[in-house]
Image: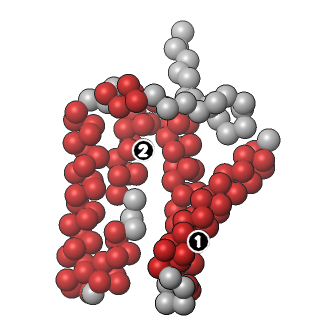
């Protein structure tokens, strides 16, 4: 008989998401080290690309979600593939929201005061990310 693992709430299943700070102590130190190593590696790669190809190309590498690779691997190992898939979906929604953020900043930063440009861009990121989550949740029902 195999043990069934609870992979957490699925979108639209009615269970609430809760913040438990005590869970931060749960992963072994080795797992934290892997996450930081991925982040450092991608940041270093971005620096090398910036020197060789210019800051615009290097900036693209800084947008790469370095920690996602390590985190998803560890989540899949510890909490199951379903939970890892949910984490990837959330990261995808956030990334698409960040594209909206970048577009708003690119279009407004020279026309509006900086605080206004960043505020509207942040609201765009949040609204777009949440709207995508809501749409996908509704489609899955």
- Residue at 35% in and 31% down: 24
Say whether residue 99 is visible: no
| Number of other residues with Cα within 10 Å of mark 1, as a class: few under 14, some 14 to 19, many 20 or more | some
**Rendering quarter of residue 64:** bottom left
- Which x, y percent locates residue 121? 56, 71
- Residue at 54% in and 9% down: 1
- Which x, y percent locates residue 66? 34, 57
Q: Could you give the CA–CA distance between mark 2 and mark 1, rounded to whole angstroms?
A: 31 Å
Dot 1 lies on which element?
helix
Residue 34 horizontal side relative to residue 130, left or right: left
- Which x, y percent locates residue 97? 57, 64
Location of residue 136 with respect to 124 vertically, above or below: above
Which one is nearer the viewer's eye here, 1 or 122? 122
Q: Which residue is mark 2?
A: 72
- Residue at 45% in and 28% down: 20
Q: Which residue is mark 1?
A: 120
Front disc: 2 or 1: 1
Counting the numbered discs, the total is 2
Which one is nearer the viewer's eye here, 118 or 129? 118
Residue 59 horizontal side relative to residue 52, left or right: right
Say whether residue 124 is visible: yes
- Which x, y percent locates residue 123? 60, 64
Say whether marks 2 and 1 touch (CB < 8 Å). Answer: no
Location of residue 23 with respect to 95 vertically, above or below: above
**Rendering quarter of residue 140:** top right
Residue 130 horizontal side relative to residue 118, left or right: right
| Number of other residues with Cα within 10 Å of mark 2, as a class: few under 14, some 14 to 19, many 20 or more | many
Q: Specify how the rendered protein is coloured.
A: secondary structure
- Residue at 78% in and 47% down: 138
């Amino acid at each position: 008989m195999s043990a069934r693992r609870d992979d957490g709430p699925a979108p639209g299943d009615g269970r609430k998401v809760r913040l438990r700070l005590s869970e931060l102590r749960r992963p072994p130190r080795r797992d934290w080290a892997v996450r930081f190593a991925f982040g450092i590696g991608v940041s270093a790669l971005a620096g090398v690309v910036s020197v060789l190809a210019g800051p615009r190309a290097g900036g693209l590498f800084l947008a790469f979600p370095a920690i996602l690779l390590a985190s998803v691997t560890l989540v899949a190992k510890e909490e199951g593939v379903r939970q890892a898939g949910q984490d990837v979906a959330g990261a995808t929604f956030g990334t698409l929201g960040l594209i909206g953020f970048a577009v708003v900043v690119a279009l407004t930063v020279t026309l509006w005061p900086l605080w206004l440009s960043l505020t509207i861009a942040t609201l765009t990121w949040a609204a777009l990310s949440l709207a995508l989550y809501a749409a996908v949740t509704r489609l899955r029902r």
